[in-house]
Amino acid sequence: MHVLLVEDEQDQRELVANILEVNDIKVTQADSVESAIVSLKNLVKQNTLPDVIFSDWKLGTLTGISLLEYVRNNSLNIGFVVATAYGSVKHAIEAIEKGADDYLSKPFQSQELLLAISKANTAKSLREQNQSLEKQLTEQQNMVDLVGNAPCMQQVYERIKRVSNTNATVMITGESGTGKELAARALHQLSDRKNNSFIAINCGAIPESLAEAELFGAEKGAFTGAIAQKIGKIEAAHQGTLFLDEIGELPILLQAKLLRFLQEGVITRLGSNDEIQVDARVIAATHRDIPTQISKQEFREDLYYRLNVVPLRMPSLKERPEDIPKLILHFINKFEQQYGGQSAKLSAPTKKLLLDHDWPGNVRELSNKLERFVLLGDEQELIEDLTRQETNSTNFDTNMPQQNGEFNIPENGMNWDDFEKQVLQQALLKTKNNKTKAAKLLGMGYKQFLYRIEKFEL
Ligand SMILES: Nc1ncnc2c1ncn2[C@@H]1O[C@H](COP(=O)(O)OP(=O)(O)OP(=O)(O)O)[C@@H](O)[C@H]1O
Ligand SMILES: [Mg+2]
């Protein structure tokens, strides 16, 4: 262990140094806060930080607290013990509050000194361990590429981590744009298969007539147009991961063949009788409700049970609005880097609009909107896009006064307050928060307008 000992009285300092050195502790001595900081700077350069600093409270005109602040402000992970004068509990409390690991009131026994130093050293090691754990976690998180730490996302990460390194089949469900494919890639990335291929098939995108050859491969001449041997997607995923996207769209005939592969781990290419062993981890995804499909006999129940060993549901963006600010930052950064240079800033009212939006297209919709914003730098366009969608969904747009100035109450009624609030909001957005112009836009006096926006706390 290495201790930096800071004490301005030479006799006292040498006494303590002696006790420590007798106990095999290396000691660097300093007689003031300033000289302690100089030694620390040198030690940082040599990459040999002390484990613990043992500092006297009173050091000339300064106190040990100044040194403690220097250490903590510079994020130097060093244990810290302060020696206080007999009976000055106030100093002890202050030291602990500022981040000292322990204090010792003078006079102390050598055993007490050694105990305090060893406790501070343990505290330092614990901090070190915590830091490296946190670093590992963020690294893992980064690799996974999924942004958001709402509780429902934590559960997703937890499950991904737990099952990634198994061969269990995972069935990912969730609305469109919720990150099902990202989750599948994360499962692959965090597994031992990460250096082998990740093969994704969109089951809804292959024409039924070609689907079998696409999945299982075909020998030359197996069907008209098969001019060469074709390796299927399943075979290509050997030793890697096979991602069956939109599994709900897989034709029923192929469902039986896929089931055979899942049960026996073998496939046969079209036009051949040879069985080929394939070791692939299977992940499936769908935005459809498979149980409903089963009841309509569009999906095989036995296949569903084979696939649904570990269900993983991706939450919709509406379920985790607290993640929207993080996602906004993430996408703006991402697209700024992608398209180079110009920085795009969103005003506070637009951010609010993004927060209040319904996000039927989930994260993909948010990503698309922000990509366009970064490309065009046109905040007004984004605002109009968002408000258009909102008013459409509440059916106001079509009923708003047109040229003839007539307004019709929707058949199924409406909520006056919502309506008024939206009109006020739109007026503010259209005029970039210029209240005079906004009031004029609505044919209203300024005071009357102010009164209304205060009523809705806009
Ligand atoms: N949690 C997230 N963090 C960052 N980006 C995300 C997140 N979820 C989704 N995305 C991004 O949103 C887009 C859609 O994600 P993905 O393709 O994984 O969704 P999906 O659920 O497969 O959608 P679909 O059902 O429409 O195929 C991608 O660009 C993806 O990078
Ligand atoms: Mg997808």
Image: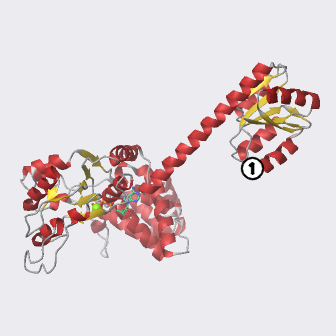
Q: Position of residue 315 (x, y in %)?
A: 33, 50
Ligand 1 - quadrant of the structure image: bottom left
Figure check: 57 above or below 152: above
- Please give left or right for residue 68 compared with residue 414 in the image: right
Label 1 CB sits under 8 Å from any ligand 1 atom: no
Q: Position of residue 328 (x, y in %)?
A: 46, 60
Q: Residue at x 63, y 36 (%)?
A: 125
Of helix, strand and loop, which one carries label 1?
Answer: helix
The image quadrant where one finds the N terminus is top right
Image height check: is 56 above or below 148?
above
435 is higher (above) or lower (below) than 155: below
The front one of 153 and 161 is: 161
Q: Residue at x 16, y 68 (%)?
A: 217
Residue 204: x percent and y percent? 18, 66
Kindly identify the residue that appears in the image at 93 percent across and 28 percent down: 11
Q: Quadrant of residue 420?
A: bottom left
414 and 49: which is toward the camera:
49
